[in-house]
Amino acid sequence: MESINLSQMESIFDEIENRIVNRLRANEEAYVQLLRQRNGLKERHPFVKSVLEGYTAVFPSAEDHQAWLDYKQALDESDQLELMALYMQGHADCFAY
């Protein structure tokens, strides 16, 4: 069996994640409600949107802004690795079954 490298796995996972999100949007009302809630909060509270989008002006200093960007990147990357690990564990569990 041919092994795949991390870059290939990330690409495959991105495609799968995209299909899952599309399926959730089309079929899961609870998911759609959460998306609406998130969007509503950003619209009603511009500060939330500003922080999420990393606008420099909302941070007390350039150092705090960079810390937020570094934190957000580490959070996104760790979340992605956790999802990939869950996906791979699902495959391992299927093979074991």
Image (tube, rainbow, N blue to C red):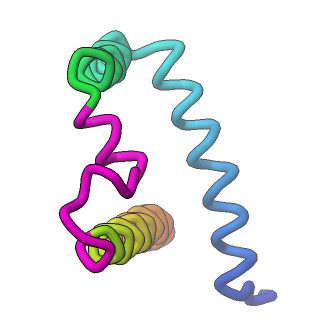
The C terminus, quarter of image: bottom left
Work out whether residue 41 or residue 81 is closer to the camera in this orientation and state it.
Answer: 41
Residue 5 drawn at (x, y percent): 71, 88
Q: Which residues are magenta?
A: 47-64
Q: Is residue 44 above or below residue 93?
A: above
Magenta segment includes 51 = yes
Q: Main secondary structure of the magenta part?
A: helix
Who's the residue at 28% across and 77% down the image? 67
Kindly tell me whether residue 97 is visible in this rendering. Answer: no
Say left or right for 5 vs 30.
right
Residue 60 drawn at (x, y percent): 19, 63
Who's the residue at 32% across and 73% down the image? 62
Say left or right for 67 vs 6.
left
Residue 80 drawn at (x, y percent): 44, 66
Who's the residue at 28% across and 27% down the image? 46
Q: Is residue 58 above or below residue 84?
A: above
